[in-house]
Image: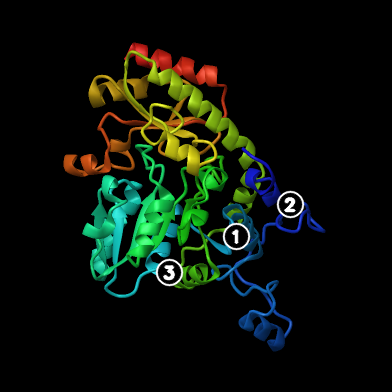
Amino acid sequence: MGSGRGDGTRSVHGRGGPRRGPLVAPIAQTSTFTYDSAAELRRYLDGTDPELFLYTRYGNPTLRELEERLAELEQADDALVLASGMAAATTGLLSMLAPGDEVLCSASVYGGTARFVRELLPRFGFGGRFVPFEELHDLGRHVGPRSRVLCFESPTNPTLRVVDVEAVCAEAHRRGLLVFFDNTFSTPLVQRPLALGADLVMHSLTKALAGHSDLIGGALCGSTERIAAARGLMKVMGGCLDPHAAFLVLRGLRTLHLRVARQNENALAVARFLEGHARVAAVSYPGLASHPGHALAARQMRGFGGVLAFAPKGGLAAAERVFDGLKLVARAASLGGVESLVSLPVHTSHHGLSAEQLAAAGVDPATMRLSLGVEDAADLIADLDQALERA
């Protein structure tokens, strides 16, 4: 996974190396903070003393510790942690908009983000329109006078299609758009969208960054100005992260480079196995040479991620039989943890979408999304093989 800043180990201790005092950041499990004097309170209000805090919804030492580590991982000026990935998505997008503005959103994004753009933004006076995946590089026909933000991800959820992030960001900026990018699938160890031109990057901390399927959280990374705007909105909307959850994410970050490397290895091994299986109709994983975005992914990513998608022959009914027949891989709607998980997107992230909406997102109803954990690859392959054969 590389070396130096790229492998994630420096983020354990931060920019200055090992700290004096506790090796592990303490949990500041408190709602409010006391002051010795009005002068001390004024120093907090003036922002001249970063060691002072007022109220955990506004900020907290444990939360700040996590924000600094995430900013370093994404090579961002600053970061903000929030109560969930969707809190990060909604707060981040709203922080970039003025009354009447419009979000252009890739048709291939996480279902919750798509629902926010499609159903909720219009209720509050904002616009929300979708751009076909194939047309992200040609925004001219989609940009209108109200267009303000382009929202997209790569690789896409759940189809693992790859976007030329640098080219799309450049095209968006040329059209006067800001770029909001979801980097949950890749993590900062595999892909750094800010370096490729994104303005604001979000993560679901629930997934690989925490890595143990035991918390809900989200994060935004970007410039000082972008994070300040999002933080001001979060303080009012209330989507702050709990200090104990932040502590668990900090603990997860200590092994991030180890877990991501193993998940990438497992994903490639499993993808190669599935690609050669007689009962599999299609496999999508950027690490396969047969993937249409393989060369692009190799250029803009370091590794190919720990998630793949495949469809067994026989449609959704066959996919459900394979799903039911797995013994080692757990049936669950998440990704990025130490356990391998499988989901059926038509029953989870893309539930309720019409056939036309699924087609626009590039999702075959039989698609199975597989998030690889850190188990032995041979055991995972054996489990998939017996489930496919029995189905």
**Few, some or many residues within 10 Å of mark 1 (<14, 14–19, 20+):** many
Pair 1/2: label in front:
1
Q: Quadrant of the N terminus?
A: top right
Eye-nearest disc, 1 or 3: 1
Q: Secondary structure at mark 2?
A: loop
Circles 2, 3 touching at the beta carbon (< 8 Å): no
- Tell me the residue that label 2 is attached to: 24
Closer to the chain start, of discs 2 and 3, is 2
Picture mark count: 3
Residue at left 38%, top 63%?
173
In depth, the one of 61 and 156 nearer the eye is 156
Where residue 389 appears, as percent x and y from the top left, is 36, 11
Instruction: Count neighbours of disc 3 (C-alpha within 10 A) and say few if under 14, some if 14 to 19, many if 20 or more.
Output: few
Q: Nearer the viewer, residue 198 or 352?
A: 198
Image location (x, y in percent) of residue 309: 37, 31
Circle 2 Cα neighbour tier, 10 Å, few/some/many (<14 / 14–19 / ≥20): few
Residue 277 locus on image (x, y percent): 37, 15
Q: Mark 1 highlights which residue?
A: 67
Q: Which mark is residue 237?
A: 3
Determine whether the residue tagged by mark 1 lies in a helix, strand or loop: helix
First along the sequence among labels 1 and 3:
1
> Vertically, is 155 above or below 234?
above
Give residue 183's position: percent from left, percent from top: 47, 49
Q: Mark 3 belongs to which amino acid? A: Met
Q: Quadrant of the C terminus?
A: top left
Three-letter amino acid code at disc 1? Glu
Horizontal side, residue 47 vs residue 263: left or right: right
Residue located at (39% from left, 41% from top):
162
Check residue 144 in the rendering and tell me which mark sits there, or answer none. Answer: none
